[in-house]
Image (cartoon, rainbow, N blue to C red):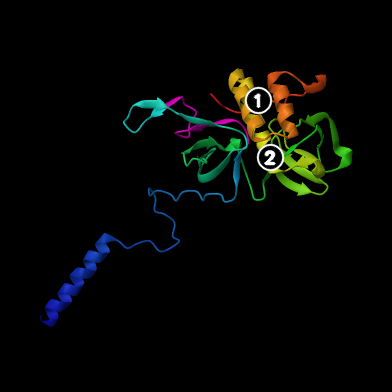
Amino acid sequence: MSRIAAAAFALAATLAACSKGSAPAPGAAPAAGSPTAPAPVPSGPAFVSAVTTLRREPVDAAKVKGPAGKDVANVLTVLQRGERITLVEDRDDWARVRTSDDKDGWLRRAAILEGDGITEATVLAPADVFDRPDLLAANAKRKIDPGTLLLVVKTKPPFSEVNVSSGPNAWVLSDRLATGEKEVSVAKLAEKARWLKRSGKDDEARQIVTLARENFAGVTLVDLLAAEIEGTPPGGAVVPVSGQAPGNAP
């Protein structure tokens, strides 16, 4: 190949490469009209903080378009307070999450509690509430009922800040908290049983009590739960009912 022909070939190759455009430099902002990068997924544990609906799409509509183009229900399932979830994606007021059975769906951000160091607990007897971590900030109008599922978000000895099923977070004396696996498990069953009872599903609520008896015999909270759900307080004592958890269950 002559020098002239070789030069012409090289020039043609250079012009062809320029016409295709070059790849953006690493870290460069996306060009106008190009899709933006997804929001970073938060790390750390996450819990459902109130009974809520897992949805197919991040909208409150009852129906959405399915894979075949037909309208389908936008409800996948109902998640109970205290269920562990994995955060997958953020989108405005919604988050795509993965449940314990690896089912993906969308939850309202307001129904998710996340952060490092969150632990589960309950109380075995009515616990005093404090508006701040100070004995002088005792709130005589609030009590935490036995068997309430608590999500501990912060400690400031001798107090712990806990997320509760109704109302704002509360401060309690840390030594009032029960963190044993069995006690916490009964508290989780109590959350489900109370929700079923509030939903008018008394028979299903009693089945939860039976489940608690069979698996956690000897735990004091089981008797308290049975008294609350079945209406037969032991020794004639009145067992308080926990406040209703907020949620958007259908």
Of tags 2 and 1, the one toward the viewer is 2
The type of residue carrying mark 2 is Lys
Residue drawn where x is 86% and y is 36% of the image: 138
59 in magenta: yes
Bounds of the magenta segment:
49-63
112 in magenta: no
- Asked which quadrant contains residue 247, the reply is top right
Side of 30 relative to 244 (left or right): left
- The disc at residue 245 is none
Q: Nearer the viewer, residue 189 or 200?
A: 189
Q: How many marks?
A: 2
Q: Nearer the viewer, residue 141 or 188?
A: 188
N-terminal-most mark, 2 or 1: 2
Image coords of residue 43 (percent x, y): 57, 51
Predominant secondary structure, magenta span: loop
Residue drawn where x is 12% and y is 77% of the image: 5
Residue drawn where x is 70% and y is 24% of the image: 226
Question: Can the viewer see residue 167?
Answer: no
Q: Which residue is mark 2?
A: 182
Residue reaching furthest left?
Answer: 1
Side of 71 relative to 180 (left or right): left
Image coords of residue 9 (percent x, y): 16, 73
Secondary structure state at the residue bearing disc 1: helix
Q: Where the N terminus falls, by quadrant? A: bottom left
Question: Can the viewer see residue 215?
Answer: yes
Determine the CA span between mark 2 and mark 1: 18 Å
Q: Which residue is mark 1?
A: 194
Image coords of residue 86 (percent x, y): 53, 45
